[in-house]
Image (cartoon, grey):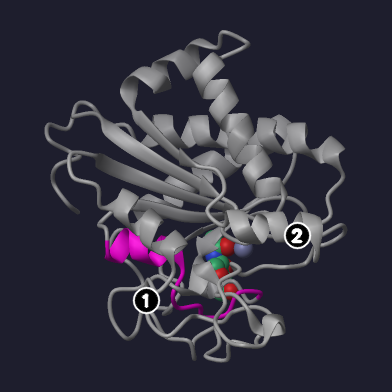
Amino acid sequence: MKPAILIDGGIHAREWISPAVVLYIINQLKNNPQQDPAIEKLVDLYDWYFIPVINPDGYVYTYTTDPCWRKNRRQTSSNPVCYGVDLNRNFGYDDKTWDPSVGGSSDPCNYVGYAGTGPFTEEESKAVMKVMNRKGVNFVAYMSFQSYSQIWAYPWGYTQDTLKDAQDLRNAANVGAAAIFSKSKKIYRVNQSALFPEFGLIAGASDDYARGGANIKYSYTIELRDTGEKKFFLPASEITPNGEEILEGVKAFANYIYKPRRKNYYYNKW
Ligand SMILES: *[C@@H]1O[C@H](CO)[C@@H](O)[C@H](O)[C@H]1NC(C)=O
Ligand SMILES: [Zn+2]
């Protein structure tokens, strides 16, 4: 069985650059318009899975009504101002990995961060969880594209405890970030999620679940452009350059973690 890579975007409605960059990657891998042999090789080596817009209702709402909306649009209370759950606080597999009091909120009226009444109360997070655990698919990497900050973060987010193989995840992320830098001179900072001061501790995020709940070794949240100038309102002219640099990052990363000579590497857990 080939190793597989899962890439998603649009978990937060207002992060418009994310679905755009995921679509850019899909087009490059599927059509390979530059006939890049490195892409041809990676398409052969891996099965690729994409979910470009995890949160379609929220995404539409940012177009029609409120460009800063982040949550989904489920009617969680009678007050329409309070609709929605933060899908990236709604993952988890125990009372530490899902915990509204850690970087989230248990108040439905919170504009951001409402974690729901338990893990996977939302159809959207549940659907992603099912893909992560799909039988017969050998996911070795998960990348959740969000924005903004230019960060390539690995678990854990809910605790400062360190993964036993954190160095593997860090090395692979550094390879990706270096490829991004050589493409565009943009700096993406690599670290454990919980160690970024701008995040703090966050429970309920999809990357922690991918790693701890679905056993996907190389699990990441990647925050795209920019570093705080235009924030969620990047001009459209940023889409292609952000896509180009991330494509280089994904290529270098995927190439780096592929270890064909180690027999059964992907079947053994770490
Ligand atoms: C990760 O974050 C910690 C805490 O801010 C910092 O001390 C450390 O230098 C960072 N590591 C890297 C590689 O940036
Ligand atoms: Zn986000």
Q: Which kind of residue does numbered mark 2 sit on?
A: Thr
Residue at 75%, 59% (x, y): give it: 62
Question: Residue 119 sits in which quadrant?
Answer: bottom left
Q: Position of residue 180 (x, y in %)?
A: 64, 37
Residue at 60%, 74% (x, y): give it: 199
Q: Position of residue 43 (x, y in %)?
A: 40, 21
Quadrant of the displayed image that contains ligand 2: bottom right
Look at mark 1 in the image and give the residue it sits on.
119
* Labels 2, 1: front one: 2
Instruction: Using the numbered discs, state the Cα–Cα distance from disc 2 to disc 1 in whole angstroms.
Output: 25 Å
196, above or below 216, in the image: below
120, above or below 101, in the image: above
N-terminal-most mark, 2 or 1: 2
Question: Residue 19 sits in which quadrant?
Answer: top right
Q: Which residue is nearer to you in this view: 180 or 101? A: 101
The residue furthest front is 78
Q: Which residues are magenta?
A: 198-213
